[in-house]
Every structure is written in C-alpha cells, then in structure tokens.
Image (spheres, rainbow, N blue to C red):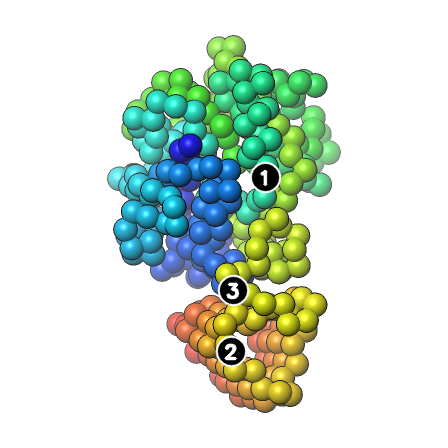
Amino acid sequence: MKAVVLVGGEGTRLRPLTLHTPKPLLPIANVAFIERQLDWLGRYGVTEVILSLGYLPDAFIRHFNGDRYAEMQLHYAVEDEPLGTAGAIRFAADGIEERFIVCNGDVLTDLDLGEMMEFHEARKAEASIALTRVLDPSAFGVVPTREDGEVIAFVEKPPAGQAPTDWINAGTYILEPSVLKRIPARLNVSVERETFPRMLEETGRLYALQSEGYWLDIGTPEKYEQAQHDVLLGCVGLPPAPGAVERSLGIWVQGTPEIAADALLEPPCLIGDGAVIGARAQIANSVVAAGVVVGSDAAVRDAILLEGASVPDGADVKNLAVTGECELSVV
C-alpha cells in the first residue's frame, strides 16, 4: 500500500519554531511528528510513502538520511511552487496506478485505517474522506452525508451556529487512481474546495466515514502543546516515546537522564535520555528533550524544552517551547 503525506506547508502559526524546522519535523513527546505519522501508516500495511515537500525540503532528506524509514520506502516530491492540496497530490502521486492513502502532515490521529479501507471497498467509492466531530465547526470545512456515508455537500467555514453538521474533513483520504485524472497537472488546486465538490457535480462516488478516533491539528502553539500532553496521558493510541519507561503514574523517562534526588516531577512529563535535572528543580506538565540541562531551583511548567535547550539555575519557564537557539536568563 502506498501513501502520500502532504508536508509542504510553512507552518507560519508555529513561528518561530518553524523558521528553520518544518512543522512535521518538530517533536511530539521527543519523536519527530512525521515519524509518528509514518509509524501509524505502517501499522496498516503502508510500505511506500511519498512525502510532498515544499518548505525546507532538504531538512526532510537530512532527517531520514536517505530513502528508508524502518521498513518503508520513502520518495520525495519537491514542488517548485505551491500547488495546493490537490495539485500536490497530483504531483506527488504521479505514476500511481493503484488505490492509495493521502493524509495531511499536521494532523495527529489514531484513525483506524483498516476500518476506513473496509468502508471504502464496501461502497465501491472513488474517494473516501475521514471525518471527525468538533464542538465548533465554523473554522473548518463541514461534510454532511447520507446514512450510508455518501457525501451530500461541502460547506467551507459555515457561520457559527449555522453548520449543517459538526462533522468536519479530518484530512485523511483513500483515493482510487482515477481521482488523479480529475486534477489538472501543475496547477494550484484545492482538493477540499475544488476537486471533491467537482466530483459531486460529476456524480463521482464520494463517501465519508465518521471516525470517533483521536484527532488534533497541531498547527498552533496551544494545539502543539496539547499534543505532547495527550500522547503522554495515553489519549492517543500511540506509544508515548521510544524506550520510555513510566517511573510513576504519568512520569516517563527515556534512557539514563541525571535527575537530582530532590527534584520534583509532576505528571504528565517526559525526561529524555541524557537530560540533567538539577537539585530542587521542578518539572510539571512538560517535555524535556535528550541532553537538555535544567539548572538547580529552576521551575519548568507547561513547557517543551527542545534539543539543545538549557534552563539556568533559578529560572522560571512557563507556557513556552524553548529551542537551543534561545538564551534564557534570570532577572
């Protein structure tokens, strides 16, 4: 099974974290987000993945150091200019002559792709869309359906309180290769606002599966932080982190960090391999990457300390994502 992962966006809402690192390479609980997506796809038999790249494409090639990830074959489709979601799919999937999966590169999910594939096959669909339910659909594209899942319409960002349904496009699709013929080559085209609605007009077999699985768009600072906590709390059907051991409820440790005996760790938190947590330091509701140093009497709350970060003695870090390029001081 093949899959296309759309990872070409600039991630502007997560700046400055994404100034030098593409959003899919940012870590979720000390694992690059794109790796979590590939692991999820691999659970359902995906063996070949095309990464649709635009922003900082070389970063992905360096990260994977070639064309393999675990048992997967990786391919890189680099856009010269933005092609939109449909244009990117057409470009990346060029030459695919079998059914394939498409997913957005900024959605954390444990969607059951096996169930979705059965749904797709049973309805002989040309395209199947995963849906997720949200409290306020006004910021999303909603997709009303018939009882059997046949799509009736696409309503983009309906006014608050006027949405015909609270089920939105979750950004995962199963497509037959015939869909590619519906997308003009090398043009900027939206699959959500152009290709799928046109398929409805042309009586394409378009269905949508309502999924109760976990779903989160990690594209804002608040959601990016939430993703860390949800993984550590077991809200997502994914392992917390490679080699992580739960020392006590909600306290995860990777490898052999150096943690002072009188340091206070409050769940959920994850301490990476080789990290140093100083005397009387407090770590609460936070993720500490490998090799990070947290000084004595420092307090880290609701924070993400990325590789290379260092927190000086006595510093108070709260509601921040700290990179190795940040220089913290105590005032």
Instruction: Return the residue nearer the eye: 243 or 252.
Output: 243
Corner quadrant of residue 153: top right
- Amino acid type of the residue that numbered disc 3 sits on in the rendered structure: Gly
How much space separates mark 3 and mark 2, taking CA atoms?
A: 13 Å
Q: Earlier in the sequence, mark 3 or mark 2?
A: 3
* Residue 101 drawn above or below residue 126: below
- Report helix, strand or loop for mark 2: loop
Residue that mark 1 sits on: 111
Left or right side of 311 for 316: right
- Amino acid type of the residue that numbered disc 2 sits on in the rendered structure: Pro
Residue at (70, 68) in percent of width and height = 249
- Amino acid type of the residue that numbered disc 1 sits on in the rendered structure: Leu
Residue that mark 3 sits on: 243
Image coordinates for residue 86, horizontal then vertical, percent: 41, 29
Q: Residues within 10 Å of mark 3 (few under 14, many from 20)?
A: few
Q: Quadrant location of the N terminus?
A: top left
Residue at (63, 84) in percent of width and height = 263
Residue that mark 2 sits on: 257
How much space separates mark 1 and mark 3, taking CA atoms?
A: 24 Å
Q: In this orientation, does residue 200 appear?
A: no
